[in-house]
Image (cartoon, grey):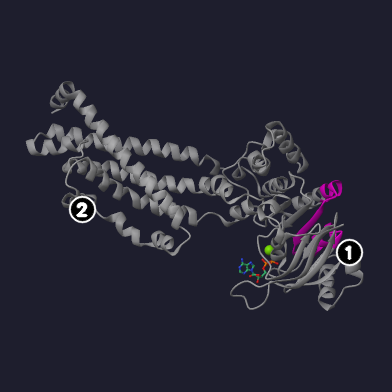
Amino acid sequence: MISEIADYFSRHGKDYLALLGGHIGISFISVAIAMAVAVPIGIAVYRSKIGSTIAERSFGVLRIVPSLAVLIILIPIMGTGVLPSVTALTILAIPPILINTVQAFQTLPKAMLEAADGMGMSTAQKFFKVKLPLAFPLMFAGIRTAVIEVIASATLASYIGAGGLGDLIFTGLSLLRYSLLIIGGGSVAILSLLTGFVLDSIYKQITKYQRT
Amino acid sequence: MIAVELKNVNKQFKGQTTPALDNVSVQIEEGEFVTVLGSSGCGKTTLIKMLNRLYEADSGEIFLFGKNIKEQNPVELRRKIGYVIQQIGLFPHMTVKANIATIPKILKWDKKRIDKETDRMLRLVQLEPDEFRDRYPAQLSGGQQQRIGLARALICDPRIMLLDEPFGAIDAINREILQNELKAIHQKSGRTYLFVTHDIREALKLGTKVIIMNEGKILQYDTPENIINNPANEFVENLIRTAELKGGA
Ligand SMILES: Nc1ncnc2c1ncn2[C@@H]1O[C@H](COP(=O)(O)OP(=O)(O)O)[C@@H](O)[C@H]1O
Ligand SMILES: [Mg+2]
């Protein structure tokens, strides 16, 4: 088995890097689009009734919709390929980012907002100097959740033609080559862990000020 | 010059059955250190927040240095008023220096001036600049945080300072020290201070004049001596008596 794995890397090293790059790329794009959608929406609605609903429950349902279901539902609508995959992954990434953005802005400490108003900050100054930086750690936590979810789900997206490390797994399954399964599955696991570790380090860095 | 003038100001919050401010009128001379005394919920904070338009009056008029505050842009108005809120409200993601320099930065003071003034403010509130400048609020004691809140409000040398129970969360010893510091700062500056407290001894000790409030009304506005010697009514008289029972003002 180990020789098979070594053999794969020696002969298909370039292909492997392409799949890995594709996996990271498609995950990155999906999360980036999800952020571009969810953050402005979250900021726009957090004060409204929709905002409270999002924060409290209804989107919790979306959070637990299985990724495979989203992928399969999209096939008849969008066919297969990169576009429906990115769409599906984006849909999966939006809820955690949206929910955390809404909650982050809803739970901003009143005293700090009042201090900002009281000292004469304009609305924009208050937003960029106080609200956004104070909301950021919680938003970042939502982004982290989304990233990890998307990296895992991108594996399934290979099934509808997204490429990425899932290709190895699906190929391994159809050819009954366990070495491919191990390489694919292992790579996704390691990528997940590594990304989680990096994001956690960044989180620690940005919340340094909270420590006494 | 009259620094602060309220004319028949009323304020009632939604859902409340009694007004938070009930037909309040008062004139405060420039340079006074006015303490606002009253029990919790009597409208002290509401009165203070009226002056920098964090709350708007239902009716009545408010003038600062002869100008109706309704005719001034709230943001511009607030930059000319120092405000220390009851809950301190330091920005946790900013260093001590950045907190104190918030408004100077917005006003685009040059860097040298900001460095110099933040250090001067830190010394003014008896904190060693080299030691405290780069700390975050989480790394400060409650008393140190309140000093920074004070420094932040003082840095632009506002003509009016509003202080809402600024020493509320401090132990007796540090409170005494801060009271004396603040009194000295006021005397040097000649600015007008409004200082909210529910501690009668603090009010009588610090105030050149004292406003006594109850249920949204100003019961008496006078010097500490006159309040002790000629209480305006039974409520004030009782208040003085309870303070004296505890060991005199
Ligand atoms: N933002 C608000 N919304 C509703 N009611 C308020 C608000 N602020 C104060 N009040 C009410 O107005 C009254 C006076 O409050 P406040 O001025 O904060 O009193 P104090 O500062 O003297 O303790 C209280 O009954 C309080 O419940
Ligand atoms: Mg109060």
The image quarter in which residue B136 lies: top right
Does the image show residue A211? no
Give the residue at x 47% y 45%.
Answer: A137
Does the image show residue B39? yes
Q: Quadrant of the C terminus of chain A?
A: top right
In-front residue for pair B68/A189:
B68
Q: Find disc 1 in the rendering and name its residue.
A: B223
Q: Is residue B166 above or below residue A141?
A: below
Question: Bounds of the magenta span?
Answer: B183-209
* Residue B194 on the magenta span: yes
The image quarter in which residue B139 lies: top right
Q: Position of residue B135 (x, y in %)?
A: 62, 38
Q: Position of residue A61 (x, y in %)?
A: 30, 59
Displayed-image quarter of ligand 2: bottom right
Q: Quadrant of the N terminus of chain A?
A: top left
Q: Amino acid at mark 2?
A: Ala
> In the rendering, which numbered label is found on residue A69?
2
* Chain that bears disc 1: B
The image quarter in which residue B96 lies: top right
Q: Position of residue B249 (x, y in %)?
A: 86, 63
Give the residue at x 29% y 35%.
Answer: A25
* Residue A7 on the magenta span: no
Q: CA distance from mark 1 to mark 2?
A: 76 Å
